[in-house]
Amino acid sequence: MRTISEIENEIIDDFALFDTWEEKYQYIIEIGQKLKPLAVEFKIDENKIKGCQSSVWLTANENNGIIEFFADSDSVFVKGEIALLMEVLSNQSPEAIVNTELGFIDQIGLRSHMAQTRANGLAAMIKQMKLYAVGFQHKNV
Amino acid sequence: MEQPLVKNAFDVLEVRKDFPILSELPYGKPLVYFDNAATSQKPQVVIDALVNYYTHYNANVHRGVHFLSQKASDAFDGVREKVRGFINAASEREIIFVRGTTEGVNLVAATYGRKNIRQGDTILVSAMEHHANIVPWQLLCEEKGARLNVIPMNDQGELVLDTLDKLLNDNCKFVAVSHTANSLGTINPIKEIIAKSHSKNIPVLVDGAQAVAHDEVDVQDLDCDFFVFSAHKMLGPTGIGAVYGKLHLLEEMPPYHGGGEMIKSVSFKGTTWNDVPYKFEAGTPNIADVIAMGAAIDYWNTIDRSGAHEQEAELLNYCTTLLADIPSVRIIGTAKNKASVISFIVDKVNAMDVGMFLDTKGIAVRTGQHCAEPVMDWFGIPGTIRASFMFYNTKEEIDFFIEQLKKAIQLLAV
């Protein structure tokens, strides 16, 4: 199993291929379009993340100490962001998720193009993923 | 008085040279600035006014006996007359400097409102107000046990005045309505609303934040009791604006903030207030921005305003036509009388995604609720994409915007 920081480094390497914000935007859109849509029964208020300008739904499963995330959004760009987060944080242990710092967002130059509201939305998504991890951690104690 | 030099015919390419920022290259691409309803760009003369003040005569006003203070005071005091002329107030004493529209509404709510609104009264606003002309009145209502009433609007985003007579009942003690709605661009029949309100002796505040940037305003002709606006939407700096109030109303109003400048004499037994308008201007004023607001007004006086107005009308018309040709686009706010603001949504495409796509091409638009959540709720939409034009924008920019919008739709449709 690859560690969170190994996956982060791969994403950073991927983004290093792009010089401009335009290329990065297109790439994130592509990733977003590939994200498997969330089944309708999960698109409920309970799974909605507060603090996002667009609607984001997030849910998670835990199997043998490994967490898997499922998410969707009405914004393709946000889907791209959350797909990146899922790539990093899915299939990890609750402990690894709770303890990670996630440096790749700054390093791929995403945050510098974000309005405050969007940055808050991204922060809210990460927080919610960590909350799931904390929840599963306690369940297993 | 020396007549300002008015350029002969309106020449957009010539005018664009006055705005240095229009040559900026975000991501190496020519800037297309269509977020003018959020804030306008500034001509060089406004930027120079700020730099000149800080470089050559920065000093506090009305306090020093020295050369710089005199010069700063003269420049500062002169702007009150310029603002008076800009909105055609009867007297410069009717002009109060504030931080902007938001503070202006708060000032009137906190002074006139606190003194005159009582339990059981109603304050009337419109369905298309932005938050700045809703929340201060809600705070006042909460404090006084008063109630907020709303003039409704129709599907085109026009106010429905059929019910106005009923809303202007005996309980109604104040009306606060925007001249031009920032989210939809609707220009409201403000004169009619004022006349009807006055026939019931109800005073009216006009939120002129958008209007001053697009139309010549005459507060005496409107006969409004209060008019508030920000400099930054009309080519001036941020952090400064003005409240116009009819003199007899201002004289009866209690002060706003306490401090220096707003007092005549201070003792621990009691304090007497300075005259209007100083009574409302506690502390050291925003000298630099007041002076730069004056420079913005001077600039307005040098351009062909009817030509500028025609240019904006043409841009609005042109863009509306091109947008209407895109099947998935729905324009939100189709009032007959509109300022150069277009809000729209795209079927199956998220507004923010479009805004970010356009940003990568150097195009600046606004997406979201435009500080007017109730307006979005009324239309049952989470937000819009808004393109807002100023006279310095061009049809070529609109062509590029439409071309890129089509690409965005193709890329982003789900």
Image (cartoon, coloured by chain):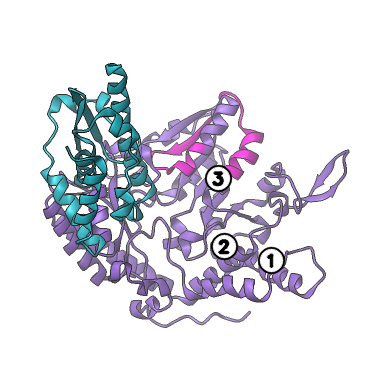
Type of residue at label 1? Answer: Asp
Residue for badge 1: B77
Q: Quadrant of residue A122?
A: top left
Residue for badge 3: B105
Label 2, label 1: how many angstroms apart (C-alpha)? 17 Å
On the image, the x and y values in percent for residue B273 come to: 78, 47
Q: Residue at x 35, y 57 (%)?
A: B339
N-term mark: 3 or 1: 1
Comparing labels 2 and 3, the label whose residue is closer to the camera? 3
Q: Are marks 3 and 1 in contact (CB under 8 Å)?
A: no
On the image, the x and y values in percent for residue B147 come to: 51, 27
On the image, the x and y values in percent for residue B355 come to: 27, 54
Secondary structure at badge 3 equals helix
Q: Tell which subunit mark 1 falls on.
A: B
On the image, the x and y values in percent for residue B350 come to: 21, 45
Residue for badge 2: B88
Q: Tell which subunit mark 2 falls on.
A: B
Q: Are marks 2 and 3 in contact (CB under 8 Å)?
A: no
Q: Residue at x 54, y 80 (%)?
A: B4
Q: Is residue B45 magenta?
A: no
Q: Residue at x 52, y 72 (%)?
A: B47
